[in-house]
Amino acid sequence: MTEAPTIRLSDYQPFTHRIEQVELTFRLHPTATKVMARMTLEPNPARPGPQDLRLDGEKLRLLSLRIDGKGAIFHQDGTGLTVPASALPAGRFTLETEVEIAPEGNTALEGLYMSNGMYCTQCEAEGFRKITFYPDRPDVMAPFRVRIESDLPVLLSNGNPAGRGEAWAEWDDPWPKPSYLFALVAGDLIAHPDRFTTVSGRDVELNIWVRKGDEGKCAYAMEALKRSMAWDERTYGREYDLDIFNIVAVDDFNMGAMENKGLNIFNSKYVLALPETATDDDFARIESIIAHEYFHNWTGNRITCRDWFQLCLKEGLTVFRDQQFSADMRSGPVKRIEDVLTLRARQFREDNGPLAHAVRPDHYVEINNFYTATVYEKGAEVIGMLKRLVGEAGYKAALDLYFDRHDGEAATIEDWLKVFEDATGRDLAQFKRWYTEAGTPRLSVTEHWQDGTYRLTFRQTNPPTPGEPLKRPKVIPIAIGLLNPNGAEVLPTTVLEMTEAEQSFVFKDMATKPIPSILRGFSAPVILEREVSPEERAFLLAHDTDPFNKWEAGRALAKDVMARMVTEGAQPGPDWLDALARVAQDESLDPAFRALALRLPGEDDMAQTLHDAGVTPDPDRIHAARRRMGEALARHLASALPRLIESMAEPGPFTPEARAAGRRALRLVLLGLQSRLDDGARAAAAFRTADNMTEQVGALACLLENRRGEAELQAFESQWRHDRLVMDKWFSLQILCAEPARAAEVTDRLTRHPDFDWKNPNRFRSVIGALSGNHAGFHKSDGSAYRLVADWLMRLDPLNPQTAARMSTAFETWGRYDADRQALIRVELERIMQAPDLSRDLAEMAGRMLGVTD
Ligand code: B3K
Ligand code: ZN
């Protein structure tokens, strides 16, 4: 294999030409699709002088190339073709090409491919070059006109419909767009239709296209879409800009969904939902992904990224917007806690290991490897901090300016920060470090109290990350509140702005030494290092007025308990048990909040926390401690459990809305505790009588976690054998709940199940991905799980490098563990590096994890 080149931000140059118009014709055929492209180009004044024309193109069979209707000289190689400047007309010219491609054989699911007899595309980031020769980069924007020729009944592309005949359809997208937003779908599909009238009175046709038989499962996604459209008008003043908005659900898809202009393509997992088949978490995810892709219409499509280094410009902002939307649709505090849980589980894990990179990285080998928690989730946190620093009005003014100034452009992070500077007068030079430096800052705090004056001193340290030994202090917005010992708030939430490595803040004229509530709402993505007594944590859990910090206090208390159990063999003490018992029974608290507070910290989270504190995590001990904690809590609550479970029963028909989902969540956490004490009868009954998937699968998990549920597992399989998405749950649950010593064995057995279709990314993730989700099972000391995962990654990689590379992050935490486990993982990563035909994607990931690729 020839070494893949590293692409660097510092090498950016505008494209040599501009494209005025693109016309594409597709003559669809599974093994020989013809793509005719005709485009009008002219020299780009930003690149003066005669310039060669370079077009990207991979795995294309070129049939013809003409310039202004005549043959022309060009050189073709493995990644594209070049027309020398000498062969190009001086001003504007047309370029016509014809290529042949084979969508049926496209297992990478990038470019034009087939899924269950349907044609579909995925172009972001660089899939368009597998469809035709083109400058496949986001700063080349052009209006597209598309003609599709096929006998299939439904033929879709971007923009507005422009003509339909027997076996053909034409689409016209007036909004200039980069090639990564191109999409085409052709298949025997059926629509769930609806309409939406925009604020200015534009009547928009809406459709969700699915396979026949699935049309009854689209109502929730459609409602979520209409709510998203109305919310973006209300909150950001953004209106939809075409006559039609189509969504298509596809079974074989590498990620969640894709925001192609006017034609979003979705993993069917994030569209199809009925109460019987989808859990409350599925409903919430559908709502947020539908919103996310829709919101991209402005943040991503109308204003796109100049180059892929700027990916967070669209992704961080769009995640931030979808988080705001979900917070508005549901409970804000609960949403914030869930978002922080995800951030810590995925982004902190990434930021504190070999794959750490800046929110705006400055180099990559394969861009698909940078659709990460750092770009997305930390990218959103950085915007949250900006908003906190400039306030609601400042944020609004900056966003209005952003849309005004950059509509129709391909922008950069510099442009983004400049609108905040111009709208608010603030200097953001130091703040920009959040975009350019990787790693999670550590924030330590000391208190000083004397004669009514209280002083808080913060110190930030920014530990080195791969390739970045030295870091500079960040701007950290620290939201704090102060409580007096009676539990009354004496200082409501105030944002302290930290800019130095060490900084003190003084509060005068205080009657008593206050109890601080620090980093309210998780106001910055940092690790707070502060020794706090169990009493103080319990006090904040009981009295903090900030819901995030109230939850955080309980969480920290639980982690302290678990850490002491792991390192000293301690037992869970009364502080924690009593505090949690109070939360469980506090009817003034939202059930969803109580469910989150009662859920024990996950094992991977605990491993990271121990590692951060300088302790080598032992996965078996963590697993054992977590189980003992659950048992202790169950025993402590034993007498209250039956009544509490009963009180959370939902009368009336199922509704996926947040209030009812919160009650189900609490009921299931409590049922999980109860199942540690009884013979499983209650969970078995809940399984039998469940009329929705949340409770059915939740009850099944309660049984499996206690080594029961064989009969229910079989019943579930016979009931749902025909439903791919539900069967994904059946596969993953057995592995996630398996006794760690047997997790690899269970996984191996399931890979032999006739329905283990490993080429389907959802199924692959629900089996191989589930094994790495069983923390102690994955880290079994004999290395069998590491080997199994590596074997499957190497098997998948030649067919679908993107998914293989993504899933290799199972190994990113290897540096946390003991020398024996590290050696075992190293063997697997090295074995991957030696694999014949290793993809650029997986090579970069394994190389970075081993520290041999920068
Ligand atoms: N923009 C797409 C992700 C594309 C991933 C390419 N490997 C979905 C999203 O973030 O909305
Ligand atoms: Zn996105």
Image (spheres, helix red, strand yellow):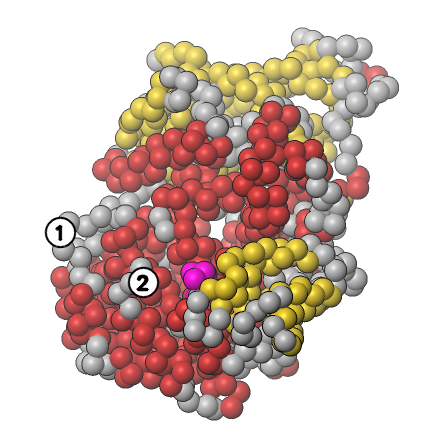
Question: Residue 76 appears at what percent x and percent y?
Answer: 72, 29
Name which residue type carries label 1.
Answer: Gly
Name which residue type carries label 2.
Answer: Leu
| Residue sitting nearer the eye, 141 or 492 | 492
Instruction: Kindly identify which numbered label has been placed on residue 652.
Output: 1
- Up/down of 812 relative to 135, above or below: below
**Few, some or many C-alpha atoms within 10 Å of disc 1 (few <14, some 14-19, many ≥20)?**
few
Left or right: residue 732 compared with residue 429: left
Q: Secondary structure at mark 1?
A: loop
| Nearer-N-terminus badge (2/1) | 2
Q: Quadrant of the C terminus?
A: bottom right
Instruction: Kindly identify which numbered label has been placed on residue 642.
Output: none
Whether the magenta-drawn stretch holds residue 546 is answered as yes
Question: Residue 22 appears at what percent x and percent y?
Answer: 59, 17
* Magenta stretch bounds: 545-550
Residue sitting at x 67%, y 64%: 505
Residue underneath mark 2: 589
- Up/down of 166 relative to 828, above or below: above
Left or right: residue 365 compared with residue 228: right
Q: CA distance from mark 2 to mark 1?
A: 22 Å
Left or right: residue 56 compared with residue 605: right
Predominant secondary structure, magenta span: helix
Q: Secondary structure at mark 2?
A: loop
Q: Is residue 62 visible?
A: no
| Residue sitting nearer the eye, 184 or 20 | 20
Question: Residue 292 appears at what percent x and percent y?
Answer: 46, 40
Q: Quadrant of residue 730?
A: bottom left
Whether the magenta-drawn stretch holds residue 537 is answered as no
